Image: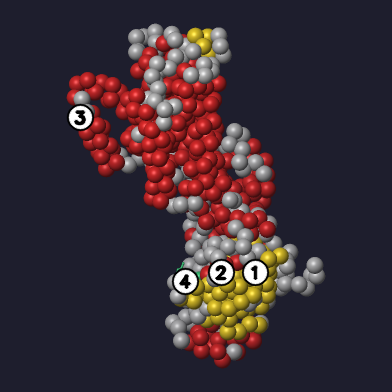
Amino acid sequence: MRLTTYVYIALAALAVLAPLIGLYPVFVMKLLCFAIFACAFNLLLGYTGLLSFGHAAYFGAAAYTTGYLVKTLHWTPEVAILGGMALAAFSGLIVGAMAIRRQGIYFAMITLALAQMLYFVCLQLKLTGGEDGLQGVPRGNLFGMLSLSNDTTMYYFVLALFVTVFLLIRRIVHSPFGQILKAIRENEPRAVSLGYDVERYKLLAFVLSTTLAGLAGSLKTLVFGFATLSDVHWSMSGEVILMTLLGGVGTFFGPVLGAGIVVALQDNLADKVGSWVSVIIGAIFVVCVMAFRRGLVGEAQAFFGRKKKTA
Amino acid sequence: MNANDPILETLNLVKEFKGFVAVNGVSLKLKRGSIHALIGPNGAGKTTVFNLLTKFLAPSSGMIFFNGVDITGERPAQTARRGIVRSFQISAVFPHMSVLENVRVALQRRLGNSYRFWQPENSLLQLNEHAMALLADVGLETFADTLTVELPYGRKRALELATTLATEPELMLLDEPTQGMGHEDVHRVTEMIRKAAVNRTILMVEHNMSVVSSIADTITVMQRGSVIAEGSYAEVSANPQVIEAYMGTTDTALQGAH
Ligand SMILES: Nc1ncnc2c1ncn2[C@@H]1O[C@H](COP(=O)(O)OP(=O)(O)OP(=O)(O)O)[C@@H](O)[C@H]1O
Ligand SMILES: [Mg+2]
């Protein structure tokens, strides 16, 4: 317990000081966006036990929405982010309502199929810019006042949202609702027999997860100034699964670490080995799944012999 | 509603699995406040009847009335909230939650805050006292903080009973509550059931005939999906059809009762 406290303090200090000690802010912002995405995904896989294979849909839908609202309608960034999240929540509600009754692989297939539909819609529509996507999205002024075009300002904005999401997920897991989610994961028929409509609990968890995935996508658009087809592509859905499993599913910090590793590898290797980066990441994934079932953080927890009383 | 009306009534319940009829025209009447045992050889359809009554399975035909209300088409959680709560043949606990938390999950529903994902967990602490009292009733108060998976089998079943009772069911369905237990545990659980039966109705599947003969008011015997006898223990154990049903199997429980 004490060790993790120190780790968190050190990480918090590092995060606050990052721009001052010469860490490239856009890189850290990218990392944080994907960390939010992976944490959102983990809420579903780790704490609800549902494997969605189409989470890029919510990330991407919000990415496009925020891009469109800022670029074309000139909304302020915070409202445009809320717009992106609202769409992600709404799509999550629709997809969830259709898929939640299905078990295991069928659930994964439905979420994948619906995400692929969204991909083709984004490819065809004028609104989303087809193959080019939305380019040149300005960051705008936060609350109409504070310009986000400065990378350092934008960085602290993203960091603040990341911390909020991280704490929110902890709260969700340790809430009356989280307690029922855990009961459902542990023994679903028993939860039903005690009078809980398990599908509604799963649906709420699904919508919470898609909403936060949307926040990640919206932020990503503002950080980079574009939303493209790769945001809704199935490989993006795969990447978030990879990040979560690599870091440790069902642990609070695992997805953050997993996102960090994948983003760091992509950024550092892409110009050296080109598309081989996918092969390298794939190989890491295979090793991870075979050797460290619980992911890096999960294995570390097991190693330090800490009883997972929480999670 | 008259107190003499049955609390639960089924009309010609049938459940077919791909051509195999597991439950064949079962009509039951449960008397309010009684302990009613459902017995029969393995595969007779007892658990399937439980699944039908609690909506875990939809009947192929037939109807179910609870307190005079047709509940045939309800969802399982809805039926549970109405007051029909079941236990399972294999012990059903939440293994990686503490013993106290197991009972608290059942109590939490009445608090009405179970969708509040923004509320801190300590809003559930107010339930601890009630949960501890329920644990004390089944002799588990010293295990409150134990992780449930570490409990011995008999204790798990006791916990299951406490959890079921926490929902204050009007009708409690117990599927083989003493199965796989040693002699002492059987005795303890039997006493718990007797205690729990005050102010409620119990329908239980049970293979142990000494348990059945000591606590059941009425016994229904099933064989191959159908009811073959009903009455007091003395009545059904003298019924030639029942004796034959039991002799045709390796189940010697009925003979072992006396
Ligand atoms: N979901 C199912 N699909 C197909 N057949 C089933 C299903 N559930 C039960 N059966 C069959 O229905 C019959 C009755 O099963 P059930 O579990 O109700 O028996 P039981 O009386 O509870 O037996 P036991 O004393 O062994 O618990 C069995 O032959 C069983 O194989
Ligand atoms: Mg059975």
Dot 1: chain letter: B
**Which residue is at 50% across, 38% downward?**
A92
Name which residue type carries label 1. Answer: Ile
Mark with earlier residue (1, 4): 4
- Report the Cα–Cα distance between label 4 and label 3: 52 Å
Some atom of ligand 1 lies within 8 Å of the CB belonging to the residue at label 1: no
Q: Tell me what residue is drawn at x 48 percent, y 19 percent.
A: A72
* Image position, residue B179 (x, y; %): 51, 68
Q: x and y percent of residue B95 in the render? A: 48, 51
Is there a contact, CB below 8 Å, between mark 1 and mark 2? Answer: yes
Label 3 Cα neighbours within 10 Å, binned few <14 / some 14-19 / many ≥20: few
Subunit of mark 3?
A
| Chain under disc 2 | B
Q: Residue at x 47, y 23 (%)?
A: A68
Query: What mark, if any, has residue B59 been given in the picture?
Result: 2
Could you tell me residue B195's position as x and y percent? Answer: 68, 64
Cα gap from disc 2 to disc 3, whole angstroms: 56 Å
In this figure, which residue is indicated by the disc labeled 1? B64
Ligand 1 closer than 8 Å to label 4 CB = yes
The secondary element bearing badge 3 is classed as helix
User: Is residue B40 something that shows in the picture?
Assistant: no
Q: What residue is shown with label 4?
A: B17
Q: Secondary structure at mark 4?
A: strand
Q: Residues within 10 Å of mark 4 (few under 14, many from 20)?
A: few
Residue at label 3? A276
Residue farthest to the right?
B2
The quadrant in which the N terminus of chain A is found is top left
Separation of residues labelled 1 and 4 (CA atoms) = 19 Å
Q: Is residue B253 left or right of residue A296?
A: right
